[in-house]
Amino acid sequence: MNKLPAITFSFWVMKICATTLGETAGDLLSMTMNVGYAVSSLILLGFFFATLAIQLSIKKFHPVIYWAVILSTSTAGTTMSDYMDRTLGLGYATGSTILVSLLVATLITWRLTEKSLSVTNIKSLRGEVFYWTAILFSNTLGTALGDFLADDSGLGFGGGALLIGGLLALLVLAYYFTKLSHVVLFWSAFVLTRPFGATFGDLLTKTQEKGGLNFGTMGSSLILFVILAVLVTGSIVKLRTSK
């Protein structure tokens, strides 16, 4: 059941691109199209469950399906986080605390039941469900953290992206020069790439008066979709030529 990609530099580039697209596409549906956070969350959760069902049914790794599920967790995570933090009025700090607790509980339960937290080779359907549950919570958590950095911390969109970028650089150094668990480093990086995408997405979409580049949710989503499509196509070609 080796249905997961290798953890390479291109994996992280696609992850950041997918999570940034998730931020802009989620905002496009909930705010630009004025669907609202609650209805958008229901629609995007439906998309997540549909793509997840396909992913669970296949027997080997397929880049298009895998990244479709990643994208669905990112878009759903964007609107779910906004619904918790804004509509329910929990705020970014409380919302982040809840999501951290859910993510940690998922990882602990996964470790106790499967005896492994492998992110490259999952042995069972139950392990794969734990994997995607953890990804959904981590992407939702990343949105809350990114919005906190951009809106409440005083750093702004650019400052938040620089801070997260610095933390990611430290994780890279830890991977190569320390003996810290690679599983811990993976999930730390997976969580942090989401707020990096969130702050970068805000930088692309917001007006210049608010510190953004003013591409808008529609333009930013289109640009990011094209980039992700090119990267996924490249991974398909590489996968086929390696056989």
Image (cartoon, grey):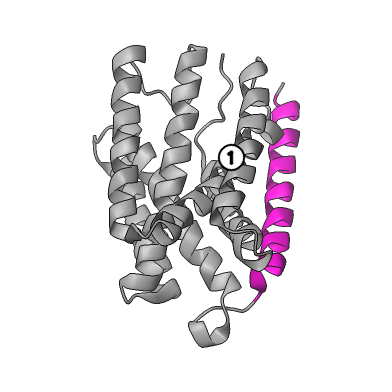
Quadrant in the picture for residue 85? bottom left
Where residue 62 appears, as percent x and y from the top left, is 68, 27
Relative to 226, is 191 on the left or the right? Answer: left
Up the image or down, 54 lies above or below 233; here it is above
Question: Which quadrant of the figure contains the N terminus?
Answer: top right
Magenta highlight: main SS: helix
Where residue 117 appears, as percent x and y from the top left, is 37, 23
Query: Could you tell me the amino acid type at mark 1?
Result: Leu
The stretch in magenta equals 215-242
| Residue drawn at x 49%, y 35% as measured from the top left | 7
- Residue at the left extreme, as displayed: 179
Where residue 126 appears, as percent x and y from the top left, is 47, 15
Up the image or down, 96 lies above or below 130; here it is below
Question: Which quadrant of the figure contains the C terminus?
Answer: top right
| SS under mark 1 | helix
Relative to 85, is 65 on the left or the right? Answer: right
Residue 90 on the magenta span: no
User: How many marks overall?
Assistant: 1
Quadrant in the picture for residue 143? bottom left
Residue 229 on the magenta span: yes
Can residue 30 be seen?
yes
Name the one closer to the observer, 236 or 91.
91
Can residue 176 be seen?
no
Up the image or down, 158 lies above or below 20; here it is below
Where residue 49 appears, as percent x and y from the top left, is 61, 31
| Residue drawn at x 57%, y 30% as measured from the top left | 5
Instruction: Classify 10 Å Cα crowding around label 1: few (below 14), some (14-19), many (20 and above).
Output: many
Up the image or down, 69 lies above or below 62; here it is below
| Residue drawn at x 66%, y 74% as measured from the top left | 215
Which residue is the site of mark 1?
45
